[in-house]
Image (cartoon, rainbow, N blue to C red):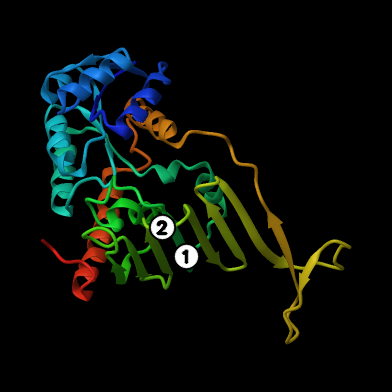
Amino acid sequence: MIKIGLIGAGHLGKIHLRLIKELPEVFELVGIYDSNPRQAAEVSKAYDCKAFSSAEALIDEVDCVDIVTPTTSHFEMASMAIKRSTHVFIEKPVTQTTYEARALLALAEEANVKVQVGHVERFNPAFRAAIPYFDQPMFIETHRLAQFNPRGTDVPVILDLMIHDIDAILSVVKSSVRKISASGVAVVSDTPDIANARIEFDNGCVANLTASRISLKNMRKSRFFQKDAYISVDFLEKEMEVVQMETLEGEPGPYDMVMEMGNGKPSKKIIFDKPEIEEINAIKEELRTFAEAIQNDTTPIVSLEDGLLALDVAEQILEKLKMSGSLIEK
C-alpha cells in the first residue's frame, strides 16, 4: 500500500482526492495540505481526511504526493518532496519554466524517485484506442476550444489548453522539432485567448494546433494523416474512427468502397473502423499507473522528461507570440 498525500485542495484537487479514495487497493490517503486553512478544513471534513498544517509535515508522512496547486508553486512543492525522497505526481504544466523543470529533473535523478506529469489526455480512452493505428503520421491538426471560464486566464491559452495537444503530438511523432511559428489574440484577458501554432518536425511531419478559451462550444478533436490512413480522435466525446486504404485483391465485394487510382495503379479499398471505446476515468487511470510505476520501479507513462519537452515547445510558441506582438510581458 502506497501512502499518499494531496497538496492543493481546489477544484481539481478535490477531483483527485475523490479518485484517490476510489483506489484503496493501491493508495492509503494520509491527508491533505492547502495554503488556505479554511479551504483545507472544509475539504478535510468533506472527505474525512487529516488536514496538515504545512506541506513539509504532510510530505514527511507519505511515500508520494499529488501536487494540484497553481503552476507558480509547482517547483517549490515538487522540489521539497523530491529532496525528501518522496515520489511526485504533478499537474501540468510541470513548472513555470523549463529552467525549473530541468532543475527538478536533476533532483529526481539524484534522489531516484518517480515523477509523473498530469498530461491527462494521454489516458483518454479514445487516444489510447488510436495508438495502435499510428504509423508515422505526417500531418496533424488539432482543435481544442473551450467556453470562457475566468479560472485559468492567469496564464496564456498555450499553457492552459494547447499544452495538452502538444504533449499528445510529441508522444506520437518520434522526431525533433525543427521550426515553430505562431499567432494569437488577447480578447478578454491580458494574454492570448485564442492561438494557432504550426510545428514542423525534422522527419517532415507538420502539426497545426488551434486553442481557444472564448468559443461558443467546447471541442477537443485531433486528426492524424499518414500513408493510407486517416485517424480522428474526439477527446471530448471519447470517440475514435479510422479510415484506411489497402490494395484491392481480386474483385470487390458488393458493399466495398473502392477508389480507382488511375495510371495503371491498383485500386484501393477503403475501410472504415470505429472501435468501441473502453469506459475509463482518465484521471483515475493516470493515478493508478503512477502507483504501478512506484510499485514496479518503472518509468511513468508521462515522465518528467515528457513534461519538460511539452513545456519547452510551449515556451517556444510563447516566444513566437512575443515576437509577433501577440503576447506582451508585464
Residue furthest out toward the bottom: 263
Q: Position of residue 282 (x, y in %)?
A: 45, 37
Residue plotted at (23% across, 75% down): 324
Q: Does 258 sit above or below residue 128? A: below
Which type of secondary structure does the marked residue at label 2 adopt? Answer: helix
Above or below 230: residue 11:
above
- Image quadrant where residue 79 sits: top left
Name above or below for residue 210 compared with residue 74.
below
Q: Give the quarter of the image for residue 201.
A: bottom left
Three-letter residue code for mark 2: Ile
Q: Residue at x 65, y 42 (%)?
A: 276
Question: Picture coordinates of residue 109 (x, y %)?
Answer: 18, 39
Task: Tell me the tag on residue 140.
Answer: 1
Q: CA distance from mark 2 to mark 1?
A: 8 Å
SS class, disc 1: strand
Q: Which quarter of the figure is the C terminus placed in?
A: bottom left
Depth check: 243 or 295 in front? 243
Q: Which x, y percent locates residue 249?
A: 80, 67
Q: Residue at x 38, y 41 (%)?
A: 301
Amino acid bearing label 1? Ile
Which is nearer the eye, 315 or 267?
315
Residue that appears at 68% across and 66% down: 245
Count of marks overlaid on the render: 2
Above/below status of 79 relative to 196: above
Image coords of residue 73 (percent x, y): 15, 39
List the residue tagged with mark 2: 169
Q: Quadrant of the N terminus?
A: top left
Q: Residues within 10 Å of mark 1 (few under 14, many from 20)?
A: many
169 or 250, which is in the foreground?
Answer: 169
Label whose residue precedes the other's in the sequence (2 or 1):
1
Circles 2 and 1, Cβ within 8 Å, touching? The answer is: yes
